[in-house]
Image: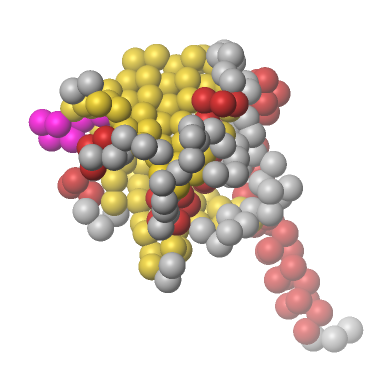
Amino acid sequence: MSRTLPITLGICLAALAQAQTADELVQKNLLAHGGIDKIKSVTSLRMTGRLQSGSFMAQVGRDSLAPDMIRETFTVQGMTQIEAYDGVTGWKISPFEGRKDPELLGEDELRPLVEEADFYGPLVDYQAKGNKVEYLGHDTVDGDDAFKLKATLKNGDIVYYYLDPETYLDIRVEYVRFIRGAVEETFREVGSYKLVGGVYYPFSMREGSKQHPGDSAKVGFDKIEVNVPMDKSLFQMPGTAKGGR
């Protein structure tokens, strides 16, 4: 027998074990959220709450429709900024910049919105979506132990998931996006999970840039509703865009 056979077999078994471990953790995470059947029974989602960054506060909202539509609103002193994606086109209305007409989103604004629009997230049916998931072992979040998963999306961007070792719910998510040759790294810490329509959703989060974590914003959701009737026109750009980047 060739001396290289045991080595090759060992490498293959190790790779297989890691793949099984990654898939096992994905399945435990989805089960912790309510199970794949409950998750897929939700086809629309409405979230409303408040954003706070220092002394600054705003009303925020998000409407999502499966499989890939999203509309986010940001309201301060009666003015509302909108960013939306209808599965094909991303657009915005930016009254705080003196623009009241809809405009096409630029690539740097569109990329994160498109990824957020994946209604069920990168881990659900990840292989069918062309995503790759790896188990990276243990790590820590604020000094607490966590399992770490690396999801490489079909477009090349990377999402790191930190899972609570007891509940298997995600407690921190990090995003690495490659846009026009630049690297953008952001994070989101989530908590206060509550059961809505048979699925556990986080009602609180803190998000910001990894380069400037002190400038992060906190979001608390007052209400999360599932399977709310939504027309697709809600996500489509009204009129004709005035331009884009």
Q: Based on the picture, tell me whether residue 55 belongs to the magenta stretch.
A: yes
Magenta residues, dominant SS class? strand
For this orientation, the residue located farthest to the right is: 1
* Whole-percent x, y for residue 184 in the image: 37, 59
* Whole-percent x, y for residue 178 in the image: 45, 63
Q: Is residue 141 left or right of residue 119?
A: left
Q: Quadrant of residue 12?
A: bottom right
Q: Quadrant of residue 152?
A: bottom right
Q: Nearer the viewer, residue 214 or 102?
A: 102
In the rendered image, the vertical position of residue 8 relative to residue 167, given as above or below: below
Q: Nearer the viewer, residue 96 or 180?
A: 96
Q: Quadrant of residue 66?
A: top right
Magenta part of the chain: 50-56
* Whole-percent x, y for residue 214 in the image: 18, 47
How many marks overall? Answer: 0
Quadrant of the snapshot with the N terminus:
bottom right
Q: Is residue 65 visible?
A: yes
Q: Is residue 220 visible?
A: no
* Whole-percent x, y for residue 23 in the image: 66, 46
Tell me the colour scheme of the image.
secondary structure
For this orientation, the residue located farthest to the left is: 55
In the rendered image, the vertical position of residue 75 relative to residue 242, given as above or below: above
Quadrant of the snapshot with the C terminus:
bottom left
* Residue positioned 58% across, 14% down in the render: 229
In the rendered image, the vertical position of residue 195 relative to residue 130, given as above or below: above
* Residue positioned 42% across, 53% down in the render: 244
* Residue positioned 25% across, 26% down in the render: 79
